[in-house]
Image: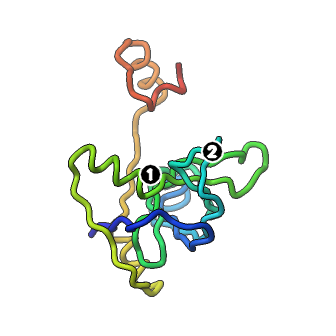
Amino acid sequence: NFLNLNEEDASLLDDVIVAGFPLGKSVSSAIKTTKGSITSLAGYGDNYSNFQTDAALNQGNSGGPIINVQGNVVGVAVSVYGKDEGIESFNFGIKSSVLKTFMKSLNIDYDEGKNISKTNKELGSLIVDSTVYLECWMTYAQILKIIDSDVSYKAFFSEFK
């Protein structure tokens, strides 16, 4: 199964569900969800390709879907701000319009979802059937070796330079 993209970007105060594997398998290998709402239509630094949600995000949620009550993707979880400073609920997702632009640029077909609300049981089944756990088994030493090889052009490694 797969998730459909929402026709429009989420609106302020829309209810959302974040699905993913926060903290990886250190908690459990079962998918986890959290509910919240859209609290701002801009991300950190007035980034309007993102929105802010009060649904809890943690390490391991990145790349996971943010869906509405119709089960359509309204965003993808990307970042958390301020946890080190004790600030809560500054969590961000990439808007569905940005996802569409990205997918079109790569000639990837996608479907837009219908605006029919689903029950929690239907949403749960959809989330379980369409969200997968990915884990990197690369060690820090391996990452340093790649960085030292001068062929590390991936954005993933930029924080180590």
Quarter that holds the N terminus? bottom left
Specify the amino acid type for callout 1: Gly
Q: Could you tell me if the residues under marks 2 and 1 are in contact, i.e. CB atoms within 8 Å?
A: no
Task: Left or right? Give the position of 7 relative to 50.
Answer: left
Specify the amino acid type for callout 2: Asp
Kindly report the distance in space between the C-alpha atoms of the residues bearing marks 2 and 1: 21 Å
| Residue density around tag 1, few if under 14, some if 14–19, many if 20 or more, within 10 Å | some
Task: Left or right? Give the position of 157 relative to 107.
Answer: right
Q: Give the residue drawn at x 60%, y 52%.
A: 42
Tell me how the rendering is colored.
rainbow
Judged by depth in the image, the label closer to the viewer, 2 or 1, is 2
Q: Secondary structure at mark 2?
A: helix
In this rendered view, identify the residue nearer to me: 143 or 139: 143
Q: Give the residue drawn at x 48%, y 78%.
A: 69
Rendering coords of residue 152 (x, y %): 38, 20
- Which residue has dot 1 on it? 63
Task: Left or right? Give the position of 152 relative to 27.
Answer: left
Up the image or down, 36 lies above or below 86; here it is below
Up the image or down, 161 lies above or below 89; here it is above
- Which residue has dot 2 on it? 46
Rendering coords of residue 115 (x, y %): 39, 80
Quadrant of the rendered image containing residue 44: top right
